[in-house]
Structure formats: C-alpha cells, structure tokens
Image (tube, rainbow, N blue to C red):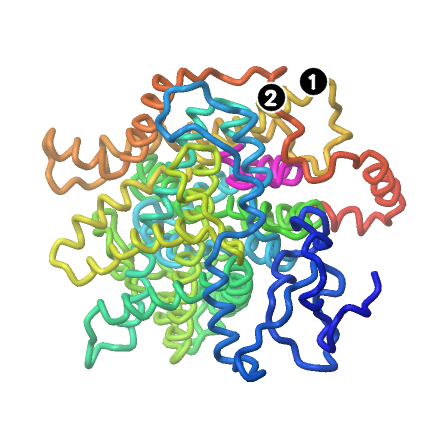
C-alpha cells in the first residue's frame, strides 16, 4: 500500500476513506492494541505499519499534543474497555438459569475463542511448573505432618502423592497441548465427562482459590511478626499492604502474573536448593557445634508417630502442599506457544516433586525430631501459620546459625505472596471460563483490552477482603471453615483431570484417531491416569476416616465428631450441592465417546507432517539428549 497519504508520523490523513481500513483484527495477525491512536515521537518506526492503521493522532486545540501524563491516563482508562475482539466472539446465549438443553457446541466455541491474551512465554510456564505454588504447605504445613506422623510417614505420604501428581499433570498436559482453551480442566470435564460435573468442578476450583487468597494474605502478615516483636503493628496494616501489592500485580494482566511468578519461583528455587546443601552440611557434623546427627532422630524418638492414622493424616497435608501444580494447565490458554513450552513445563514437575519435596523433606526429617515443641500439632488452629513453626526455620535455629532464620522467614513470606497471586489468577480465569460456557453470571466473561477478566478479578479481590478478619476476635472460627471449603478441592480437581483424560483417550480412539497424532503424549499414559484416580480415591477415603476419628479431638462426643468431620470434609458436600441440582435442572447426561467434540479449540489442526519431522529429528538425537528430554 502506498504511504503517500500518510503524515510524518505514519498515520493516515482524515481524507482517507474508513472503508479501506480492516473491519476487525481477525483480518490481520497482530494484536488490536497496535491500533491505539496515540502520539508517537518523530523518527520512530511506526508500530502500526504491520497492522491496522490508526486514526490521526489526537491533537488538541491550537495544535498542542497531549502531555505524556494525559496520554498515559487515556491509555490506562481505555485498557478497561471491552476488548474489540471479544465482541466478535460473543454469541447470543440463553440466560444462566434458563431450563434448556446444554449447548455443547457453544460452550466449546466460547472457551476456544476466549479473548484472553497469549503473553506467557516458555520461561514463565517452566517456573510456574517448578515452583509456582510452593508456599505454607511445604514450609510450614510439613511441620504439622512431621509432628503427627513422624519423618517416615511424611516421606511415604509425599512420595505417593507425588506419584499421583506426576500422572495427573502429564494427563492434563496432553489435553492442554491439544486443546489450550480457557478454563482448562473444568472445560475438559464439561466436554469429555458431563456438563453438570464440569459445572461442579469449575465452581469447586474457583471457591478453593477464593478462600485461599485471604488465608495467604493473613499468613503473609503473620510472618512479619517474626521481626516485629517489640512494637507490633495491627495485623490489618500488613494485610492491607500485601492486599494492595497483589492487586497492583494483577493490574498488569497475565504478563504481570507471569513475571511475578517467575521472580517468586526463582527465590523459592534458590532457597530450597540452598537449604538442601545446608542440611547436608549440618547433618554430617558441619554445624557450629560440630556434632554428627545422621539418622539419630529416626531412632529416637522414631520414624513413625500415631501409626497408620498418623500416616493417613500426612496424606491430607501432602495434598495441600501440592495444591496449585495444575495451574500450568490453566495457563496454557494464555501461552504464546503451548505446543512448544507446555511439554517442557509438564516434564519439569518431576524435578519439583523430587527436589523440593522428597529431598528437602528428607533433610527436614533428619534435622528436626517430631517431638520438637515448636512444630504445629494436630490440634493447631487454622491460623497457626507462624514461620517459627516451620521445620525449615527450626532446623536453622537449632543449629545456632545467626541470620539464616530471618532469610528463610523472608522466603516463606515471598512464597505465601506467590500463592496469593496464583489464587487471584486461578479463581478469575476459572470464573471467566464458566461464564463463557453460560455456567456463571454472564458479566464475569467480560475481558478488557489488556486481556484481563476484570470483573472476575474484582470478584476475587472482593472475596479477598475476608483477610481483614485477621483483626477480628472470631478469626479462628471463620478461617477454620474457610480452610474446610478448600481442604479437599484439589483432590477432587485432580480426580476429575485423571477421569477426563481416560475418557478423552477413549473418545480419541473411538473416533478413528491414533496416538501418533497427539502433539504431546503423557509419559505414564492412560495407565498413569488410572493410578492417579485410584490414589485420589484412597486419599478421600483416608480423609473421611480421619475426619470421623481424628487423632486428637477436643470434644469427644457425637457433636464433636460431626463438627470435626465437616471441618475437614466440607468440600465434598459443596461439590454435590453444585452437581445434583444442575444435573436435574438441565437434564444433562454423560458424554458418549463417539459424540465428544475433538476439533473445537485445537490451535493446530494440520500437524501430521510437522510431528513426523520432529519425531525423525528426535530419533537422531544422541542417547544422553534422549534421556535428558524425558525429564526436561
């Protein structure tokens, strides 16, 4: 196109007919943001030369151009307007509670064409997979597992749950690479299992993160008290600071989340690796007192505590520590190239399990006896998140190493904020995906020009205001029931992922496809999904038993047993409350293998030749590279 009708800034003159401009960004392969009519300085290569042509730059009266502050303000305000592309993807839909047959095609198309921005790079996904959700579950909650079951029970529980997570994440990765759609696993449950079950799993997952966010904010404020004994401030002050900090991060959209998690995860990775090295040194007589520890604490007081019941209690705490691993699949819808970056991120979950959990907790069990009075006990209240109860901090303090305990406390605070940030991301994206499938109020599907589901984010932050209960006299009761809501949510989510993968494989083969057509194939395969499903069921059974007959019950009566059961098993009735009425109202049925939609949402439909070329290239790799690519 000739540029004779453009001014010195590369913009068209007002005389150019608007009919010559593209009607939508679907006609070009560039972001809509390239068409913003903002002033650009002279001699700068115009951003829009390879995209839609903007209007003439805004010029005020008397030829004055807007100031930088005015331009930024306009850019900031315009960012909250609806994404122009979103208006093209929204179709007429029935009201949320209209009693009609579920629209499979409409739901699949809505999640596949979500206007979320694809700005997460490979490095973001890798760090999210490696250390994205490591928080109080590992650094503090593992101390409760240690005091309840002993070091051997901790390792057995985390190892078995780690195997379950490994199979689950690979199953999720296989589906997410093929279908990088909004909502991820809740959308897969709707598409491959039952719309009613997808509805229940979506709301279950959203509620899990909605209640985790205020809990993590309170935990972050509690960690500050480690340095603030002399002149303690009100918890509400630190709660407000951390609340606004996470709010500011999420104003930058998915790129802000990705960059924040990248930095947070690096801090956690360095801290855990450093602790493992320190633990080895301390164990072999490298501490200030020069005493050899070895396996002393495994002999006295012992490797197990409370027998089989203590082991079952550790399963629940281990599941809580692994919560958030599935976020890498949820982020696939906003990845620039999930076919390349997601398989690498999924494989690195192995290192997260082996390095951060198994090896780190082995060192914790060798350095801290389960009888240590500073550890969280089985009867500790819901808000017992003091970093002084962290076995990581306790082991450093027992070694009389000055300063490192404060460093580890700072790492715990960063980890807690990281989980809070992930909570906003997980809840807002799930709510937006539910709304796009007409399974939540429609306003939650609003996506602005920055790719933010802004109303869903605001709902998450509104729920986060429960963190101000930290200054209330009833905080223990409130937080106990909030934890009860999220306690088993992750187990049910992982079970649903494994079951959806089993059903997806059955539908894939029933419709004439072969496994060679899959861009990424789960390493443990469908057998791994069966193993993961069985392990998830065993954890649910173990938690049911522990809920009814706990190790230590303050009120040993029928009322006490019932109250304790609901405090640890409340998520199960909540899932049924979502599932049963929806199934009755919409009269949904289980999706048959031959009726599954295996086309909508596939970002690349013609990959046969490309996959063949990549496999031929892999066959020529040396043996060491083939082995390396199994885990990375």
- Which residue is identified by label 2? 596
Residue 602, quarter of the rendered image: top right
Q: Percent x, y for residue 396? A: 39, 70
Q: Residue at x 17, y 63 (%)?
A: 471
- 470 is higher (above) or lower (below) than 345: below
Q: Percent x, y for residue 37? A: 60, 67
Bounds of the magenta segment = 165-187
- Which residue is identified by label 1? 511
Residue farthest to the front, as pictured: 15
Most prominent secondary structure in the magenta stretch?
helix
The answer to whether residue 616 is left or right of residue 509 is: right
Asked whether 36 or 510 is in front, the reply is 36
Q: Are marks 1 and 2 in contact (CB under 8 Å)?
A: yes
* One can see residue 322 in this view: no
Q: Quadrant of the N terminus?
A: bottom right
Is residue 204 part of the magenta span, yes or no?
A: no
């Amino acid at each position: 196109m000739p540029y004779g009708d453009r001014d010195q800034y590369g913009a068209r003159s007002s005389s150019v007919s608007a009919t010559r401009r593209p009607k939508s960004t679907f006609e070009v392969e560039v972001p809509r943001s390239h068409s913003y009519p903002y002033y650009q300085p002279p001699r700068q290569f115009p951003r829009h030369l390879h995209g839609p042509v903007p209007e003439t730059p805004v010029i005020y009266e008397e030829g004055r151009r807007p100031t930088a502050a005015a331009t930024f303000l306009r850019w900031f305000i315009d960012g909250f307007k609806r994404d122009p592309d979103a208006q093209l993807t929204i179709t007429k839909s029935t009201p949320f509670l209209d009693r009609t047959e579920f629209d499979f095609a409409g739901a699949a198309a809505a999640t596949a064409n979500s206007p979320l921005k694809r700005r997460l790079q490979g490095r973001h996904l890798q760090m999210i997979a490696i250390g994205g959700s490591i928080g109080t579950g590992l650094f503090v909650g593992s101390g409760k597992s240690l005091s309840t079951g002993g070091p051997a029970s901790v390792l057995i529980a985390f190892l078995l749950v780690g195997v379950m997570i490994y199979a689950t994440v690979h199953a999720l990765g296989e589906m997410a690479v093929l279908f990088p759609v909004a909502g991820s696993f809740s959308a897969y449950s709707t598409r491959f299992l039952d719309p009613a079950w997808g509805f229940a799993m979506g709301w279950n997952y959203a509620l899990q993160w909605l209640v985790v966010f205020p809990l993590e904010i309170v935990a972050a404020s509690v960690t500050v008290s480690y340095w603030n004994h002399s002149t303690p401030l009100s918890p509400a002050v630190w709660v407000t600071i951390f609340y606004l900090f996470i709010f500011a991060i999420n104003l930058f959209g998915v790129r802000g989340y990705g960059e924040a998690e990248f930095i947070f995860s690096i801090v956690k990775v360095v801290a855990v690796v450093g602790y493992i090295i320190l633990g080895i040194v301390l164990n072999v007589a490298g501490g200030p007192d020069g005493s050899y520890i070895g396996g002393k604490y495994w002999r006295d007081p012992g490797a197990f505590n409370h027998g089989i019941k203590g082991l079952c209690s550790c399963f629940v705490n281990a599941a809580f520590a692994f919560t958030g691993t599935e976020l890498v699949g949820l982020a696939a819808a906003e990845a620039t190239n999930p076919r390349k970056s997601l398989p690498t991120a999924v494989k690195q979950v192995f290192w997260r399990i082996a390095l951060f959990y198994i090896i780190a907790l082995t060192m914790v069990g060798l350095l801290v006896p389960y009888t240590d009075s500073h550890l969280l006990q089985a009867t500790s209240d819901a808000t017992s998140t003091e970093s002084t109860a962290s076995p990581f901090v306790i082991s450093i303090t027992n070694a009389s190493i000055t300063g490192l305990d404060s460093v580890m406390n700072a790492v715990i605070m960063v980890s807690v904020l990281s989980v809070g940030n992930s909570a906003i991301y997980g809840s807002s994206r799930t709510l937006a995906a539910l709304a796009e499938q007409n399974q939540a109020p429609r306003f939650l599907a609003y996506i602005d020009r920055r790719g933010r589901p802004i109303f869903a984010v605001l709902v998450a932050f509104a729920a986060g205001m429960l963190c101000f209960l930290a200054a209330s006299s009833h905080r223990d009761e409130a937080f106990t029931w909030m934890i009860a809501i999220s306690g088993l949510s992750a187990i049910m989510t992982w079970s649903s992922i494994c079951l959806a993968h089993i059903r997806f494989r059955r539908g894939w083969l029933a419709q004439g496809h072969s496994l060679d057509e899959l861009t990424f194939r789960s390493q443990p395969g469908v057998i791994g999904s069966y193993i993961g499903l069985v392990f998830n069921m065993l954890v649910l059974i173990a938690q049911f038993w522990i809920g009814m007959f706990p190790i230590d019950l303050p009120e040993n009566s029928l009322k006490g047993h019932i109250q304790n059961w609901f405090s640890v098993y409340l998520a199960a009735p909540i899932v049924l409350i979502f599932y049963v009425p929806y199934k009755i109202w919409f009269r949904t049925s289980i999706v048959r293998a031959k009726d599954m939609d295996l086309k909508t949402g596939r970002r690349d439909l013609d990959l046969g030749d490309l996959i063949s070329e990549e496999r031929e290239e892999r066959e020529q790799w040396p043996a060491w590279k083939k082995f390396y690519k199994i885990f990375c």
